[in-house]
Amino acid sequence: MKIHESKIGRVVFARLSEGEDLLEAITLRAEQAKITTGFFILIGALKKAKLGFYREQEYKPIEISEPVEIISCIGNISVKEGEPMIHAHISVSNDKGEAFGGHLLSGCVVSVNAELVLVEAADLRLQRQLDEKTQLHLWDV
Amino acid sequence: MKIHESKIGRVVFARLSEGEDLLEAITLRAEQAKITTGFFILIGALKKAKLGFYREQEYKPIEISEPVEIISCIGNISVKEGEPMIHAHISVSNDKGEAFGGHLLSGCVVSVNAELVLVEAADLRLQRQLDEKTQLHLWDV
Amino acid sequence: MKIHESKIGRVVFARLSEGEDLLEAITLRAEQAKITTGFFILIGALKKAKLGFYREQEYKPIEISEPVEIISCIGNISVKEGEPMIHAHISVSNDKGEAFGGHLLSGCVVSVNAELVLVEAADLRLQRQLDEKTQLHLWDV
């Protein structure tokens, strides 16, 4: 069993802008803060959502074409091919409170507000490598 | 794109009491710990829940009048008009495991247990300002 | 109202292995990292899930016998009878994106990937004590 340890570093807060793609927006803030390894939590709202369900080496997309609250979006930051990569899962709810979730795909569009809190691992540069079997970029196990 | 950085500070653990209003209880612990900026995660259970869905400048309430598990309640702490303000979203589940979620409103009543973990931003006092368009108090974008 | 404060310590990242029991796997990584008090977030996928809904002094199990995404698994680590104990709640989603949740019980089996981020409380050893009324091991309130 491998574990990867680090001192904890800075905490960064950012409000994302209306109309931004959520996955891209988180990636941009991690880059702006120069965080290559860490984790984050986010709450807010979306104009529409695109969630992924992994099977047979790819993410099947699930599209929600109405406004939703982001109940939770949590994930991590590590390095894939030299660049910070966000891996996140997201849970959203509609106007009846019903919850839906999955892997965060491109295609989630920020609505009036989304608030990101990023935490940095201060002295670790955790790497992702392509795993042939799953066709995912994974950490060492 | 604005980001707000801080050194990370203390981590604070608290069990909330049966019968407390969840939103108020989190606010009280942040005040007790003198944390004005930070983030938190919480799990536990509720006697009943009140979730918000934002539209047309206000939160439409969704009420759940039966006991539920708090699957996740995550959010942040920043400063509104000089006082620490909690912004949180919550996901709950009923006895069939079905999940519901939304913005954390007053009216969620703690059941047998709720466990809060608060993390402090050590040298930041992040401000919320009224946004005329949405009538929400938001961070600078 | 009691709160328990600590300096924040290390952050630890670990990928869990296919086939591991999720609750046991998190416990093993906390032990390996020598973290007795802290919190964590986790995302990933399961082959099958077992969620708990607390009532009348026990967790009623809810079983999901198909593959699901772990939308969120968040929780804390503290000490019960001298050993680190994980308390976590989990939210999962099926191939339609429908979300289910509850208390994390043994019986959740890791699928292709699960990514754990653990944060240590550096100078606190938070204790759980048996509460007669609920038959749960709880923190001081």
Image (cartoon, coloured by chain):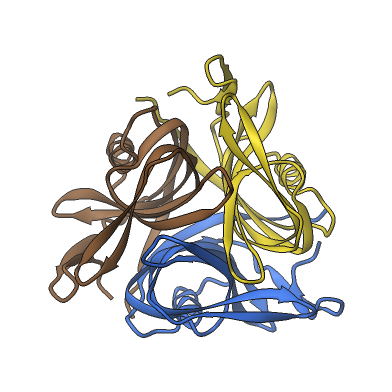
Chain colours: A blue, B brown, C yellow
Q: Is residue A42 visible?
A: yes
Q: How many marks?
A: 0
Q: Position of residue A86 (x, y in %)?
A: 58, 74
In the depicted view, which residue is nearer to us: B58 or B26?
Answer: B58
Q: Is residue B98 above or below residue A34?
A: above
In the depicted view, which residue is nearer to us: B43 or A97?
Answer: A97
Q: In this rendering, would C40 be left or right of B31?
A: right
Q: Which residue does the image show at 78% across and 80% down from the upper left?
A: A57
Q: Is residue B61 above or below residue C98?
A: above
Q: In this rendering, would B12 be left or right of C36?
A: left
Q: Position of residue A20 (x, y in %)?
A: 39, 84
Q: Is residue A130 above or below residue C2?
A: below
Q: Which residue does the image show at 24% across and 48% down from the upper left?
A: B84
Q: Quadrant of the C terminus of chain C?
A: top left
Q: Quadrant of the N terminus of chain C?
A: top left
Q: Position of residue B14 (x, y in %)?
A: 43, 33
In the depicted view, which residue is nearer to us: C138 or A139?
Answer: C138
Q: Is residue A116 visible?
A: no
Q: Which residue does the image show at 49% across and 62% down from the upper left?
A: A99
Q: Position of residue A118 (x, y in %)?
A: 47, 64
Snapshot quadrant of residue C3? top left
| Residue that protrudes farthest toward the top in the picture | C132
Snapshot quadrant of residue A36? bottom right
